[in-house]
Image (cartoon, rainbow, N blue to C red):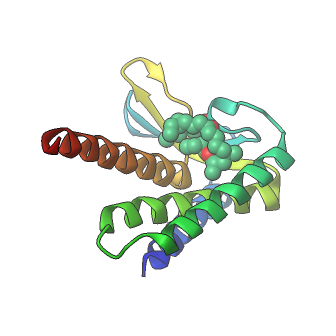
Amino acid sequence: MYYLIALAIIFLDQLTKWLVVQYMDLGESIPIIENFLYLSSHRNSGAAWGILEGQMYFFYIITVIVVIGLIVYLQKLPKDQPWMKLALSLMLGGAIGNFIDRVLHQEVIDFINTYIFTYDFPIFNVADSALVIGVGIILVLTIMEGKKEKELS
Ligand SMILES: CCC[C@@H]1OC(=O)[C@@H](C)C[C@H](C)CCCCC(=O)CCC[C@@H](CC)/C=C/C=C(\COC)CC[C@@H](O)[C@@H](O)C[C@H](O)CNC1=O
């Protein structure tokens, strides 16, 4: 069931990237909300903030490890942890979404360009959003778990 969430993320990610490639020129920027949100067609052959630019084999290896880890973890999780399963499914979809780009184009297509206050946050995509949301949910669950244990002890 949670694999459907991962598939939905992959489909949404690849669809949005296809639309950007189809209807936008590289470097083109369309303002959605002035000074806050723009659609900017961008490519990144690195990871976040363009780190390790061009190290495709490193990215393939890391992504395969991440994907296998997520699948094993998803299989092992007991039924009563829906939030954890959601987080892992989001990360699985995000990791595969960027992996497809890296295998097909040796770079990742990015287009969500936000200005958080004056800081021009790196341009990202649906896959990155799913990854960061998945990481965020796991962080929240871990903090909540820690608080619960403290109350019990
Ligand atoms: C989101 C992980 C990045 C994603 O990792 C992936 O694919 C994984 C599955 C495979 C990587 C090879 C391994 C993880 C590297 C970890 C990393 O990099 C530190 C991340 C910290 C993170 C806090 C959790 C910050 C967030 C940043 C950004 C996302 O903001 C929403 C900016 C995204 C833009 O720089 C955009 O150009 C990136 C481009 O799309 C390629 N994306 C990737 O490499």
Q: Which residue lies at the image location 53% right of the left edge and 74% below the top edge?
A: 7
Query: 28 and 73: which one is in front?
Result: 73
Quadrant location of the N terminus in the rendered image = bottom left
Residue 4 horizontal side relative to residue 43, left or right: left
Quadrant location of the C terminus in the rendered image = top left
Asked whether residue 114 appears in the rendered view, the answer is yes
Percent position (x, y) of residue 96?
64, 63
Query: 59 and 153: which one is in front?
Result: 153
Asked whether residue 25 appears in the rendered view, the answer is no
Quarter occupied by residue 99:
bottom right
**Residue 107 to residue 83: above or below:** above
**Residue 99 to residue 146: above or below:** below
Q: Which residue lies at the image location 36% right of the left edge and 21% below the top edge?
A: 117
Residue 81 horizontal side relative to residue 93, left or right: left
Which quadrant of the picture is home to ligand 1?
top right
**Residue 124 to residue 69: above or below:** above
Residue 142 horizontal side relative to residue 19, left or right: left
**Residue 62 to residue 36: above or below:** below
Query: 56 and 115: which one is in front?
Result: 56
Percent position (x, y) of residue 60?
79, 54
Residue 34 horizontal side relative to residue 106, left or right: left
Q: Which residue lies at the image location 71% right of the left edge and 40% below the top edge?
A: 44
Q: Residue furthest front?
A: 153
Query: 112 and 27: which one is in front?
Result: 112
Q: Which residue lies at the image location 43% right of the left edge and 69% below the top edge?
A: 77
Percent position (x, y) of residue 6?
51, 70
Q: Residue furthest left?
A: 151
Percent position (x, y) of residue 125?
55, 49
Q: Residue furthest bottom?
A: 1
